[in-house]
Image (cartoon, grey):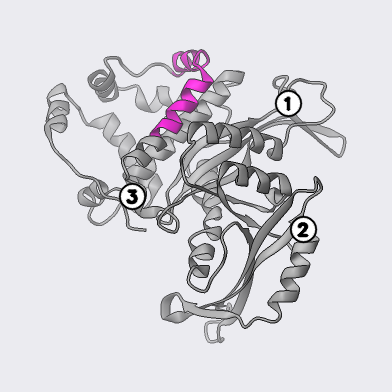
Amino acid sequence: MFLCRLGARRQVNWLLRCPAGHALFQTLFGCGIPHGDAMNDVVRRLGVAQIQECVTRLVEMLIDSKALYPYRFLGRYFLVAVDGTGTLVYSKRHCPYCLTKTHNGKTLYYHNVLEAKLVCANGFAFSIMSEFIENPGENVTKQDCELKAFYRLAKRLKARFPRLNVVLLCDGLFANGTVFALCRKYHWGFLITLKDDQLASVNEEFNELSRKQRPLVYHTGKNAAITQSFLWVNDIGYVDAKRRHHTLNVTQCKETRAHPHTGCDAPPEPCTTRFKWISSFPVTEKNVTELCNQGGRLRWKIENEGFNIQKNGGYNLEHAYTNDETGIKVYYFLLQIACILDQLIEKGSLLRQCFTKGIGSAKNFAFRLLEATRNVLFTHNDYRVLLDTRIQIRFHPP
């Protein structure tokens, strides 16, 4: 359902339950394609923790097989972007764990999730672990939130991958002393967005000291059309509300690129964007571009290659595939598994060998997969031939 991006459970009945589809499933799994309602009945009785482990284990296998080693940050670290997103919204209370929000006298009941995705420079964005943001019951004085969920998620992630070299990529919500202390305790690096209205003493010291520096300027992009100007200050002291002392490094990147006017004959109009990060890494002239371009800015992949594709690229993340409390979580994890498999296929060398001219888009691939499932008869002999064929899959370079 998710690999073919059907968008709804009932589409399984209309599009997948056909002779060729049943034959494929009989060959692979020893059973036919179930009715959407039967599938839902099974999903409701699955263990949420077990399905989460399936997602995590997939990524662990890629790490253990060294398939992701070429994409490590600074040749050593795995980048893990952390961010929250909404999944379902109801006009009436759906379950005791709903979050609530009231606007103009109308109360909405919704479900959010905090995601930790392993992101790579070539575009991979794999869900490695998830934490659902939910209230413990109906009558709560203070609702669950992203920060509370992050502390739970971080503890689970460290327990599951105790020796993994992790660098966290987070937005400004996580720029606080508790997160800094947690990263130090777990021996994690971090690159966290710093806004101008956050950590006043840190911003003030950076602004004062950076004025005395000469920016490091690089020209990049096609025809050197992009200009990047870097400033940084190391070893900025910060004392949080709990009197914990932290040493932070702050980097700023101003990127200017030419944006054409609407008129064809008009000269390009420059557009400047400013980025700023708090880093656990001391910044030098040698590593500043990699810290910013191959580190801090990859946080957007959890938004683009992650949430945006899952919501608007055919997976239909915000669709209620079920109203069962357990089923909602299981379907979410099954969607993550489908996304991992899709990315491995789309960026793998086998797809490029089969479709030398490309397939246009990921949605086109899902459509071709659906049509192959519906129309191509896949026998046990075909399966044995595939199993006996030695292949090697390579991914797009970083």
Of circles 1 and 3, the one toward us is 1
Above/below status of 152 relative to 70:
above
The chief SS type of the magenta part is helix
Mark 1 or 2 closer to N-term?
1
Looking at the rendered image, the quarter that the C terminus falls into is bottom left
Q: Is residue 82 left or right of residue 89?
A: left
Outermost right residue = 105
Q: Which residue is mark 3?
A: 347
Q: Residue at x 69, y 82 (%)?
A: 212
Which mark's residue is nearer the viewer, 3 or 2?
2
Q: Is residue 57 inside the magenta stretch?
A: yes
Is 345 located above or below residue 156 in the figure? below
Viewer-nearest of discs 1 and 2: 2
The amino acid type of the residue labelled 1 equals Asn
Q: Residue 320: where, in percent of width, then height?
A: 58, 28
Horizontal side of 163 relative to 182 (left or right) equals: left
Number of other residues with Cα within 10 Å of mark 3, as a class: few under 14, some 14 to 19, many 20 or more: some
Q: Position of residue 273 (x, y in %)?
A: 63, 70
- Checking the image for residue 135, the label placed there is 1
Residue drawn at point x = 70 percent, y = 22 percent: 94
Q: Which is nearer the eye, 211 or 394?
A: 211
Query: Mark 3 belongs to which amino acid?
Result: Lys
Which numbered disc flags the more N-terminal residue, 3 or 2?
2
* Mark 3 touches mark 2? (CB < 8 Å): no
Residue in front for this viewpoint, 302 or 207: 207
Instruction: First in sequence, mark 1 or 3: give its number.
Output: 1
Name the amino acid type tagged 2.
Leu
Marks 1 and 2: CB-CB under 8 Å? no
Kindly report the distance in space between the C-alpha atoms of the residues bearing marks 3 and 2. 40 Å
Across and down, in percent, residue 326 comes to 57, 19
- Magenta range is 36-58
| Residue 326 within the segment the image draws in magenta | no
